Amino acid sequence: MATTNGKQKVLIVGGGFGGIKAALELAKDGGEHFQVTLLSDQTHFRYYPSLYRTATGGTPANSSIPLASLFEGSEVNIRQGEAVTLDRKAHTLTLRDGTVLEFDVLVLGLGVVTNYFGIPGMQDFSYSIKSPAEIIRFKEHLHRQLADDRRPDLNYVIVGAGPTGIELAGALPGYLEKIMANHDIKHKAIHIDLVEAAPHLLPRMPRDTSRMVTRRLRRLGIKIFTQKVVQGVSGDQLTVSGKPLMSHTVIWTAGVTNHPFFKDNGFTLTPRGKVATDMYLQADDNIYVIGDNANTPYSGMAQTALLDGTYVADAIQRRAKGDDPRSYKVKKPITVIPVGERWVAVLWGKTRLYGWLGWILREAADLVAFADYEPWWKAGKQWLTGFDYEESCKVCLAAERRSMVDK
Ligand SMILES: Cc1cc2nc3c(=O)[nH]c(=O)nc-3n(C[C@H](O)[C@H](O)[C@H](O)COP(=O)(O)OP(=O)(O)OC[C@H]3O[C@@H](n4cnc5c(N)ncnc54)[C@H](O)[C@@H]3O)c2cc1C
């Protein structure tokens, strides 16, 4: 393969779970054989599993880590920009701003994008918790509703009972009550509905887990509607299977689709929209596709993206040495779903854990996950942010400080 200064130019696109892991693994070479560039359209790594915490009072620092901090002292060149066009023959990638980047090896881990399935009004009137900006908008809305108007519409509707919808449904009642208490609002009943089109919650998971989670959510006061389809949303109501439901707060967690980059650049897609790859996660010669983008059995989970990033770095290193890479081996991830305070459902192979034991495991899993990307001391600091509370609302912040002093 053609190289520059005897070094292969490895261009990694996507500063998420897979891309960062691949870059960190290749950086262990100390820049001897590879010139590694990580391109991302964000300055921070989003730790998605904690976004629901940030959306319900937690600090943004728990779910967002600067790329510059993750790569401090490494040889990886971090670039900000949005990849738009791939030229396979010229081995170049063109960014939105017109910059052209050359590569010998390309790794693509761009993640997924929200899909509203064309439901009228959903994109305009719903809230989402997939990015820090969306979370700020959501939290500001909750505070405005509850505190400023003092005539709140206390009907909240979460659409989609996958892990994200369930995590949010579990954490929302406690958060809303906290806002009301902080603002001295007389306690009022909250109604949180969880709407799912499938016959049961967590449609891709075993039925016993679905049943346990359903029971837990009901105990938290969540009303569950299964086999119900949202057909439209306006500013103050939504239509669910033909019937109107009043709400000013609809949160969409029901759909994602593969990143449009792949369709736009002529990649072969499978019927579920993922990129078809060979046994080395290659979509083309020296073009690897990882994480949520690749058609692997457990694509769509952080642990899979991490595995893919590690695998691809190893394959690139082996090829550079003239060895054959090992073929990609699937690993079933552990599923961990928090449902309210100190209650977590864990599926680990055939083992199931529910409740506070699951919660301890989840806390440990977060620490291990941070340590996959950072030295232990930094990972520990990052993990501790999971216990911090942060609000832009001054009233809530002052109340929280007072309660810390009282403790
Ligand atoms: C709210 C939420 C909660 C989740 N919770 C869990 C959980 O508890 N456990 C679990 O296992 N999984 C969870 N997931 C799924 C998990 O986060 C993903 O599987 C994982 O992030 C996939 O990693 P990735 O590297 O493929 O993509 P991502 O981590 O999404 O990274 C993609 C990166 O590419 C960047 N990018 C996108 N387009 C471009 C472009 N054109 N040019 C340059 N850069 C670009 C993005 O900004 C991002 O930085 C959750 C997902 C969400 C949304």
Image (cartoon, grey):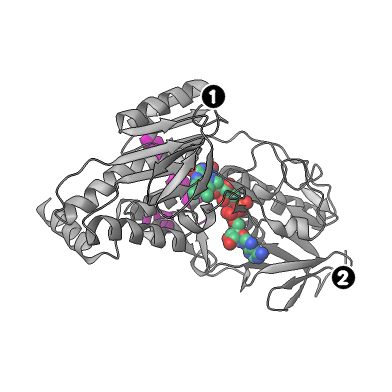
Residue 56 appears left or right of 282: left
* Residue 299 on image: x %, y %: 65, 42
* Residue 377 on image: x %, y %: 40, 57
**Quadrant for the N terminus in the image:** bottom right
* Residue 42 on image: x %, y %: 56, 67
Residue at the image position 44 percent from the left and 31 percent from the top: 225
The answer to which of marks 2 and 1 sits earlier in the sequence is: 2
Q: How many marks?
A: 2
State the mark number for residue 90: 2
Quarter occupied by residue 106: bottom right
Marks 2/1: CA distance?
47 Å
* Residue 367 on image: x %, y %: 43, 47
Frontmost of labels 2 and 1 is 1
Instruction: Kindly state the secondary structure of the residue where label 2 is placed.
Output: loop
Q: Depth check: 179 or 370 in front?
A: 179
Q: Which residue is mark 1?
A: 206
The amino acid sitting under disc 2 is Ala
Task: Please state the extent of the stretch shown in magenta in the rendering.
Answer: 359-382
Q: Single out the residue that lies furthest toward the left.
A: 406
Residue 149 appears left or right of 379: left
Residue at the image position 22 percent from the left and 49 percent from the top: 178
Q: Single out the residue that lies furthest toward the bottom.
A: 98
Q: Is residue 226 above or below residue 127?
A: above
Asked if residue 218 lies in the magenta stretch, the reply is: no
The amino acid sitting under disc 1 is Pro
Q: Are marks 2 and 1 in contact (CB under 8 Å)?
A: no
Residue 18 appears left or right of 98: left
Q: Is residue 390 above or below residue 202?
A: below
Q: Residues within 10 Å of mark 1 (few under 14, many from 20)?
A: few
- Main secondary structure along the magenta-highlighted residues: helix
Asked if residue 379 lies in the magenta stretch, the reply is: yes
